[in-house]
C-alpha cells in the first residue's frame, strides 16, 4: 500500500515531464510559423499579396507562413476581435486615425526601431506623420493613392486655356473661361458625401495646412472657428459662381463620371483609383494636376490614403514579423504591390509607375513637404465624420445655411469629443 502514492507521484512526474516536452515542441513549432491576415478586394489584389509572400518564403525557408485572405468588408468587422484575443503576427490596415485607434489602446506594437534600422525615415518621409501616434511609429506603409484634379485636355483647349492652373487665381480664371465657353467647369458626385469631403479636405489643407487640419480632425478645434468658416466661404464662391454641375447631390460617382466622358464637364476632384474605369477613347484626353495652391505660405499637403502593415501587440512570432516587414518595405516590393493593388508605392525610392496619371500622382505625393492626410473619414472618428459629411450635403443644398450647419457640427463635436 505504501508504494501506491509513489507510483502516483511517479506517474504525475512523467506526465508533467511529457506535457512540458510537448509544450516546448509546440512553442518551437510556433516560433517558425508566421500568421498573416490580409484584407483584399478582388482576385488581382489577392494574387499580388500571395506573390510577395511566396517570395518571402523563398528567402526565409525556415519560416512557415500561414496566410488568411479575408474580404475587406468582413475584415473590418473581424479585426478588433483578432487584436484583442488570439492575434496573428501581421495584419494590414490603414494609417492615420484608423491606426491611432489601435495604437492608443495598446493593440499595435511600436515600430519606431524598424523605421530607424531599415531606412524608412528616408524612404517613407512623406507618410511618417500619418504612421505616427504620440511621436512613435506603429505602421509600415505599403501603398497609397493620389488625389487631384482630373480634367479634359480638349475642353481646356476649346476654352482657350493653355496650361494647367498652379494657383487658385489661375484656377478661378480657368473656371470662368470654361463657363463662358458653355462648358460646366466641375463635376462632383454629391450623393456620395465622401466626394464632398475631398473638397473640404483640400480647401482646408490649402488654406490652413495639415497641422490645423489634423487638430480639427481630432476634435480639438471648434467648427465655429473663423478658419473653418473660411474653408466653407471659399467653397461657397465656387457654388455661387455656378462652377459645379447642377443638382450635384443627385449623382453618385458612377453617375457623374459620364459628365467628363461625354465632354459636358471639364474637371473633377478625385483619387487616382478611378483611372481603371476610363473608356479607351477618352483616356488620351484625360489629364491630372495638383490641387491649386491658395496660400503660398502654407506648406503644401495632400490627401494620400495609406495602406499599411502592423504587428499586433499580442502576436506570438514577432521576430519573423519584423523580418517580414523589412522584406516587404523595399522599393522593388513597393512597386510590385502598387501595380497589383491599383495604387502607388508609398516608398519614395520605388521606380515610378508607367501610367501617365499614376506617374504624376506618384511625383506629387513623393515630393510633398507639408504632410499627407488620410482623407476626411479616415482621419477622424466615424461618428463625427458621418455628421460632418451630412453637414456638407446640407451646405451644398443651401449654402446660405452655412452658419446653421457649422453651429450644428460644433454641438456634435462637443458631444462626441467632450471638449
Image (cartoon, rainbow, N blue to C red):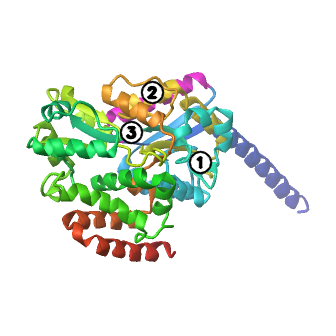
Looking at the image, is mark 3 or mark 1 earlier in the sequence?
Answer: 1
Q: Kindly report the secondary structure that dominates the magenta region of the rendered protein.
A: helix
Under circle 2, the secondary element is: helix
Disc 2 marks which residue? 335
Which numbered disc, 1 or 2, marks the residue that appears first in the sequence?
Answer: 1
Image quarter of residue 380: bottom left
Q: Which type of secondary structure does the marked residue at label 3 adopt? A: loop
Residue 72: x and y in percent read 37, 47
Q: Residue at x 48, y 52 (%)?
A: 210
Give the residue pinned by disc 1: 138
Q: Secondary structure at mark 1?
A: loop
The part of the chain drawn in magenta is 41-61
State whether residue 277 is above or below residue 203.
above
Query: Camera-side residue: 108 or 399?
Result: 399
Q: CA distance from mark 3 to mark 1?
A: 20 Å
Q: Nearer the viewer, mark 3 or mark 2?
A: 3
Q: How many marks?
A: 3
Q: Which mark is residue 35?
A: none
Residue 335 visible from this viewpoint: yes
Residue beneath disc 3:
145
Determine if the magenta segment contains residue 391. Answer: no
Instruction: Please state the horizontal and vertical placement of residue 76, each as a whole percent of the image.
Output: 41, 53
Asked where in the image residue 383 lies, by quadrant, the reply is bottom left
Classed neighbour count for the residue bearing mark 1: other residues with Cα under 10 Å, few (<14), some (14–19), many (≥20): many
| The N terminus, quarter of image | bottom right
Q: Earlier in the sequence, mark 3 or mark 2?
A: 3
- Kindly report the distance in space between the C-alpha atoms of the residues bearing marks 1 and 2: 22 Å
Q: Nearer the viewer, residue 190 or 2?
A: 190
Q: Is residue 332 left or right of residue 20?
A: left
Q: Position of residue 119 (x, y in %)?
A: 63, 32
Amino acid at each position: 500500500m505504501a508504494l501506491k502514492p509513489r507510483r502516483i507521484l511517479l506517474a504525475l512526474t512523467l506526465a508533467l515531464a511529457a506535457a512540458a516536452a510537448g509544450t516546448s515542441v509546440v512553442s518551437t513549432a510556433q516560433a517558425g510559423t508566421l500568421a498573416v491576415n490580409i484584407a483584399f478586394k478582388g482576385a488581382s489584389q489577392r494574387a499580388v499579396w500571395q506573390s510577395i509572400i511566396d517570395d518571402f518564403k523563398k528567402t526565409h525557408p525556415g519560416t512557415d507562413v500561414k496566410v488568411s485572405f479575408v474580404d475587406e468588408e468582413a475584415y473590418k468587422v473581424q479585426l478588433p476581435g483578432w487584436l484583442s484575443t488570439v492575434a496573428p503576427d501581421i495584419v494590414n490596415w490603414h494609417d492615420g486615425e484608423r491606426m491611432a485607434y489601435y495604437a492608443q489602446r495598446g493593440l499595435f506594437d511600436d515600430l519606431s526601431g524598424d523605421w530607424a534600422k531599415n531606412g524608412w525615415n528616408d524612404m517613407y518621409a512623406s507618410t511618417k506623420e500619418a504612421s505616427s501616434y504620440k511621436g512613435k511609429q506603429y505602421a509600415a506603409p505599403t501603398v497609397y493613392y493620389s488625389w487631384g484634379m482630373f480634367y479634359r485636355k480638349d475642353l481646356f483647349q476649346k476654352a482657350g486655356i493653355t496650361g494647367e492652373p498652379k494657383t487658385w487665381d489661375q484656377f478661378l480664371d480657368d473656371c470662368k473661361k470654361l463657363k463662358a465657353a458653355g462648358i460646366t467647369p466641375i463635376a462632383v458626385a454629391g450623393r456620395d458625401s465622401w466626394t464632398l469631403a475631398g473638397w473640404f479636405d483640400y480647401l482646408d489643407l490649402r488654406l490652413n495646412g495639415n497641422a490645423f487640419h489634423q487638430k480639427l480632425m481630432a476634435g480639438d478645434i471648434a467648427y465655429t472657428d473663423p478658419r473653418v468658416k473660411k474653408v466653407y466661404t471659399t467653397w461657397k464662391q465656387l457654388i455661387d459662381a455656378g462652377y459645379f454641375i447642377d443638382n450635384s447631390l443627385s449623382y453618385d460617382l458612377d453617375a457623374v463620371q459620364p459628365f467628363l466622358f461625354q465632354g459636358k464637364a471639364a474637371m473633377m476632384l478625385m483619387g487616382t483609383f478611378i483611372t481603371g474605369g476610363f473608356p479607351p477613347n477618352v483616356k488620351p484626353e484625360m489629364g491630372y494636376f495638383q490641387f491649386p495652391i491658395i496660400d503660398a505660405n502654407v506648406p503644401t499637403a495632400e490627401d494620400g490614403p495609406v495602406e499599411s502593415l502592423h504587428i499586433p501587440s499580442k502576436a506570438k512570432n514577432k521576430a519573423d514579423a519584423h523580418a517580414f516587414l523589412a522584406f516587404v518595405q523595399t522599393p522593388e516590393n513597393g512597386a510590385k504591390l502598387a501595380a497589383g493593388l491599383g495604387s502607388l508605392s508609398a516608398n519614395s525610392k520605388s521606380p515610378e509607375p508607367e501610367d501617365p496619371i499614376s506617374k504624376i500622382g506618384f511625383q506629387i505625393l513623393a515630393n510633398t513637404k507639408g504632410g499627407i492626410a488620410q482623407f476626411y473619414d479616415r482621419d477622424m472618428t466615424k461618428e463625427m465624420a458621418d455628421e460632418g459629411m451630412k453637414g456638407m450635403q446640407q451646405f451644398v443644398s443651401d449654402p446660405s445655411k452655412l452658419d446653421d450647419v457649422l453651429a450644428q457640427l460644433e454641438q456634435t463635436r462637443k458631444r462626441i469629443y467632450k471638449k
